[in-house]
Amino acid sequence: MVENGNVDNVQEFMQEQVNKMFELNGTLKLPTIGPMYAFSKDFSSYANDFVTLGKDMVELKSNMDSYWSLVSAAYARAVRETVERAPKQLTTKEDFENYRRASIEAFEENFTALFTSSEFSEVYGKLFGSQLNVSKAMQSIVEKNFKTLNLPTRSEVDEMLKDIVELKRTVRDMKRSVEARNDQARIAT
Amino acid sequence: MTKQELQPDQKEQNVQPVQGEPEGQIKKEPTLPEEIKEAYRKLEKARSILHTAGNIEVGETPNEVLVEKRAYRLLHYQQLVSKTARTPILIVYALINKSYVLDLQSDKSWIRSLLSQGFDVYLIDWKAPTAADKYVSFDDYVNCYIDDCVEAVIKRTKVEKLTLHGYCMGGTMSAMYTALHQDKVRNLAVIAPVIDGQKDFTVIGNVAKNMDVDKMLHVIGNLQSEQLYALYSTLKPFKQGINKYLNLLQNIDNEEFVDNFLRLEKWLYDTPPIAGETFRQWISDIYKKNLLVKNEMKLSDKIVDLSTIKVPLLNVIADEDHLVSPQCSAPLNDVVSSTDKRIMMFHTGHVGLIASHYSQNNVLPKVGQWLIARSQ
């Protein structure tokens, strides 16, 4: 809750409100036994998926903001440095050429410094993670629909893929060991 | 890519002289309307050239397909001169972009140069993985695909061992293969391999540190081309993203410059996906946990112990490499047990090392000398 009015508390308070807003399950309080069981189970499951998707999108937005704030800061630095390095007056062709060179250099240096910084790595990692979370939440909803249509889901196909790759490796190893034994037998005879 | 890689020749960068202007005469400055007209003409020409850019020919050195499987093609290049080296060379290309960068154009072709030095050259040309290859791992690439190709080359050439020659990620896989199947390798020659992930100071190494690749494998499977483009766009974003196109406009009437530009541009954006599990291992095991240089990386149930490598080793590195830091490649020579080992460092970049006039004049003669001395 907001106690001292500082930023951390405000953020905490906001997060609490967002969580409450998304707690559809608790708000509706559907019975989990009796004739409403099947409806309640499906409803809860879909509601949870949408809640998760909503939360992930909020997180993605926040990480996207952090990412753009880093990019904007680098952009502002590059513009400042371009102004410092470039010719003050643009009258001749060479002036324009020098302006181009100065701006490319300034932007290149600042953005390369950004992309190789540990701060960028962290923010980019979080952004990438939250993008994956959004995709995952959407996949989960789609999977449920596939189940309803009695179609194999992505996870089920995935398990089969894993099995096929494992089987291929086993066949490969068996083939190699048979070949090795045949070679040994040939040498012995 | 560095400036040197993409525009390696100074003469190619110069704006072509205006036709029919006698020497010694004072050049008349064009008026503003003339300048605008000229800029518009160049833009139009660039537009029409870029429209048909995809048709440009690459990889023209004659070759035959020896083996074709779902995952790869094994190519054998036609001899250009009589064979002087007894040991064949099998080139293991990386899983990033396409192998024709090694044969981009005849005067900058790595493969053609090796052929003209009397080597018998084979190449593994990886095919793009499909969604069904999500769980294909380094174990499959190294112990199955590369091993099958090695066997095929050995059988065809009737030798016991060959020279394994890997570029970038292909260099890393060649080192892994040599550690596990040394009885089939006579020499190991690698170009810019990723070995010590913790010493990679490039953008890729930096981004890899916080990438959740386990989740990525689960959610999206293979690493898609678009994600690779996004990653590439952080490498020299303005010199490559903007400046090179401005250079193209300036040199649009220089046919040689335009051809060079288009070939490299075609290669840069010809990016197949990477199998999900392979990419997970690449980032997690090699970059994050640094298992390869610690001799703790596992392929199937076998540990890849680089210290068991005893064959002659050549490690070719570029000091301006912004994709694989030289500090990341060099430790291979420290970790192996070979007594005959050498690092060759060149003043160029990752692509300049293999597909430039610099490489033809400075890198390949030395690499060829080293190989020929160990190929009889």
Image (cartoon, coloured by chain):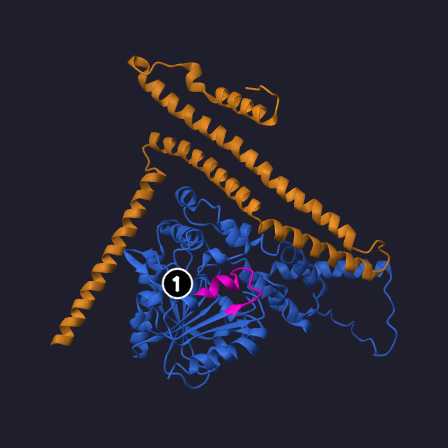
Chain colours: A orange, B blue
Q: Residue at x 53, y 62 (%)?
A: B267
Q: Secondary structure at mark 1?
A: helix
Which one is in front, B171 or B64? B171
Residue type at the position of mark 1: Met
Q: Residue at x 51, y 43 (%)?
A: A125
Q: Examine the structure image and report whether residue B325 is included in the region drawn in magenta.
A: yes
Q: Residue furthest front?
A: A4
Q: Total of numbered circles in the picture?
A: 1
Residue corresponding to mark 1: B173
Q: Residue at x 42, y 83 (%)?
A: B373
| Vertical arrangement, residue A78 with respect to residue A180, above or below | above
| Vertical arrangement, residue A168 with respect to residue A181, above or below | above
- For this view, does B159 lie left or right of residue B218? left
- Can you tell which quarter of the image residue B29 is in? bottom right
Which one is in front, A83 or B46? A83
- For this view, does A103 lie left or right of residue A130? right
Which one is in front, B38 or B148? B148
Q: Examine the structure image and report whether residue B252 is included in the region drawn in magenta.
A: no
x and y percentages locating residue B46 in the rendered image: 68, 60
Q: Which region shows up in magenta? A: B317-331
x and y percentages locating residue B180 in the rendered image: 31, 65
x and y percentages locating residue B266 in the rendered image: 56, 61
Q: Residue furthest left?
A: A189
Residue A19 shows up from this direction: yes
Chain of the residue on which disc 1 is drawn:
B
Local packing at callout 1 (Cα closer than 10 Å; few below 14, some 14-19, many 20+) is many
- Can you tell which quarter of the image residue B252 is in? bottom right
